[in-house]
Image (cartoon, rainbow, N blue to C red):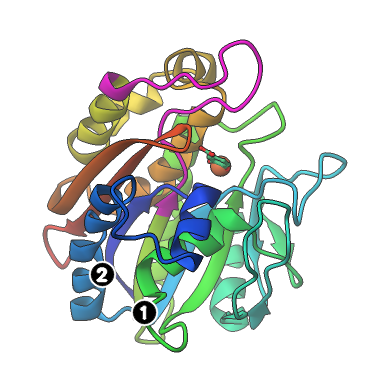
Amino acid sequence: MAKIVGGLTTSHIPAIGNAMSQKLEKDPYWKRFFDGYEPVKAWLDEVKPDIAIVVYNDHGLNFFLNQVPTFAIGCADQYENADEGWGLKTLSSFKGDAQFSWHLAESLINSDFDMATCQEMLVDHGLVVPMALMWRHLDEWPVKVVPLAVNTVQHPLPGARRCFALGKALRQAIESYPEDLKVVIFGTGGLSHQLQGERAGILDTDFDLQCMEKIIHDPEWLTQLSNTEIMEKAGTEGIEVIMWMVMRGALQPEVKVVHKHYHAPISNTGAGVLVLENTNDS
Ligand code: DHB
Ligand code: FE
């Protein structure tokens, strides 16, 4: 049976990708941010997952505004990335597991989450930056990937409550897969940031830290907030935090905190990192 070994959260800010290609990890601006990932890398090295389900949002590379699914899942054996205009280098392709993906899609659809299924999918910085943060030190990606895209770009967006429920259905989907696979779930994006309009550049560290605490110990709290309330605090792009709720929903109600780190700002954004494990095996 497939097993969830844990969940983690990370921002996906494109500037991080460029800092990694330019090897700026020890630069004063970046050092504290990158130091926050060393325990995550050590944990991944220890638990050795076979597959990462990366919950991310596409920012216009694969889905443009003419067609935006609310929830989409990659069902391919390979995913490429491509130049999306942030100056990011394209990295080597990611191996997928189409059979596992189709199982997840079927189970999620049976649980009333009508996923779009993508047999071709270009993955953008929302997925690539988190993958590189974890594993750029290796010659090849050590895990297969299932991209799970959530619309955080074109309104109407799904809410935190719906994303949390998707996570619960995802757990059932994973745990009903007969093959022995160790699965890690990435909740990516956030935390507070706004890249556009009059409030561009706003950031709310207190709200970010509150979100991190609540997502660990009381995730239902976020399900009570509307998207408007989240965006008032966290900025229009701060709504990306709903993707952390998918990861959290897939874990048990009580979790163990393996690692927690926060650094702001990176570019325009509050960057939060969590590594969470289930507290028991059931
Ligand atoms: C930034 C953050 C994002 O989440 C993103 O998708 C693009 C840019 C930023 O802070 O620069
Ligand atoms: Fe983003």
Q: How many marks?
A: 2
Write down the quadrant of residue 263 in the picture.
top left
- Disc 1 secondary structure class: loop
On residue 189, which mark appears? Answer: none
Asked if residue 40 can be seen in this view, the reply is yes
172 relative position to 43: left or right: right
Marks 2,1: beta carbons within 8 A: yes
- Disc 2 secondary structure class: helix
Q: Residues within 10 Å of mark 1 (few under 14, many from 20)?
A: few
Q: Amino acid at mark 1?
A: His
Q: Amino acid at mark 2?
A: Lys
Name the chief secondary structure element in magenta.
Answer: loop
144 relative position to 37: left or right: right
First in sequence, mark 2 or 1: give its number: 2
Residue identifier under label 1: 137
Span highlighted in magenta in the image: 187-206
> Percent x, y for residue 231?
50, 19
- Please report the residue visible at 39 percent of the width from the left and 60 percent of the height from the top: 24
